[in-house]
Image (spheres, rainbow, N blue to C red):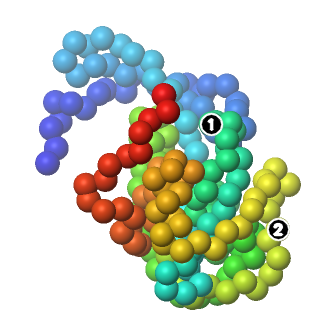
């Protein structure tokens, strides 16, 4: 179902400031009903990957790391950027090996999602890696500090309900592989 009366008309486009990880574009659009012009930011970003990795039935390879945007630690599945010249499967295998030292196994696509279509142009590809084994020591990038945790599904669910696992793209990937919570989901009381 598509309603073309909701489509905005792009009037102009220009490059914005250079930022690490993002190629900024500023687009001018015309509102479909009022004809008012609005400038909108588009962050052109490489494709991303998330990896739901399991060495056996019931345990999952997760990473804990500091996330600057929230100024706190998170627990989440392995994730990262697709490098130039890579496809998402190659990137997923590389990221899993670099961040955790795990590799091998049987790989299956869990599809992809639009990371944040409000202002990002990219997709996040989800991969399931079953039967992985630790084949090397982790070798994260110089800008990463990562702890590897092999967690049961109950431990992943506890991290989710406690708020330690709250990365939306990681939750999207995990929820395509396993049932994360009983329905309907009731979030824990907010500390706000």
Image: 148 above or below 187: below
The residue that disc 2 covers is 139
Report the residue at 70% width, 53% height from top. 65
Image: 12 above or below 185: above
Report the side of 144 relative to 118 (left or right). Answer: right
Residue 117: % across, % down = 41, 41
**Mark closer to the chain start, 1 or 2:** 1
Residue 42: % across, % down = 50, 33
Mark in front: 1 vs 2: 1
Image: 131 above or below 108: below
**Label drawn at residue 31:** none
Q: Nearer the viewer, residue 97 or 84?
A: 97
Image: 54 above or below 189: below
Residue 91: % across, % down = 63, 68
**SS for callout 1:** loop
Report the residue at 80% width, 55% height from top. 145
The residue that disc 1 covers is 70
Q: Nearer the viewer, residue 55 or 121?
A: 55
The image quadrant of residue 93 is bottom right
Report the residue at 55% width, 78% height from top. 59
Q: Tell me, yes or no, if residue 125 can be seen here.
A: no
Report the side of 112 relative to 8 (left or right). Answer: right
Report the side of 62 relative to 174 (left or right). Answer: right
Q: Residues within 10 Å of mark 1 (few under 14, many from 20)?
A: few
The image quadrant of residue 62 is bottom right
The image quadrant of residue 69 is top right
Residue 7: % across, % down = 25, 32
Report the residue at 48% width, 28% height from top. 192
Q: Nearer the viewer, residue 189 or 94?
A: 189
């Amino acid at each position: 179902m598509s309603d073309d009366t909701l489509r905005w008309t792009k009037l102009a486009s220009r490059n914005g400031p250079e930022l690490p990880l993002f190629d900024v574009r500023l687009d001018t659009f015309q509102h479909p009903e009022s004809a008012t012009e609005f400038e909108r930011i588009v962050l052109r970003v490489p494709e991303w990957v998330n990896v739901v990795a399991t060495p056996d039935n019931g345990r999952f390879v997760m990473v804990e790391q500091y996330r600057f945007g929230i100024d706190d630690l998170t627990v989440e599945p392995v994730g990262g950027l697709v490098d130039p010249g890579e496809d998402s499967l190659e990137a997923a295998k590389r990221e899993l090996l670099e961040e955790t030292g795990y590799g091998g196994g049987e790989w299956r696509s869990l599809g992809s999602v639009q990371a944040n279509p409000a202002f990002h142009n990219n997709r996040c590809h989800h991969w399931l890696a079953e039967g992985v084994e630790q084949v090397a020591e982790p070798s994260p990038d110089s800008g990463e500090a990562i702890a590897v945790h092999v967690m049961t599904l109950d431990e992943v669910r506890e991290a989710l309900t406690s708020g330690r696992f709250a990365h939306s793209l990681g939750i999207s990937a995990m929820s395509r592989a396993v049932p994360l919570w009983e329905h309907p989901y009731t979030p824990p009381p907010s500390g706000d």
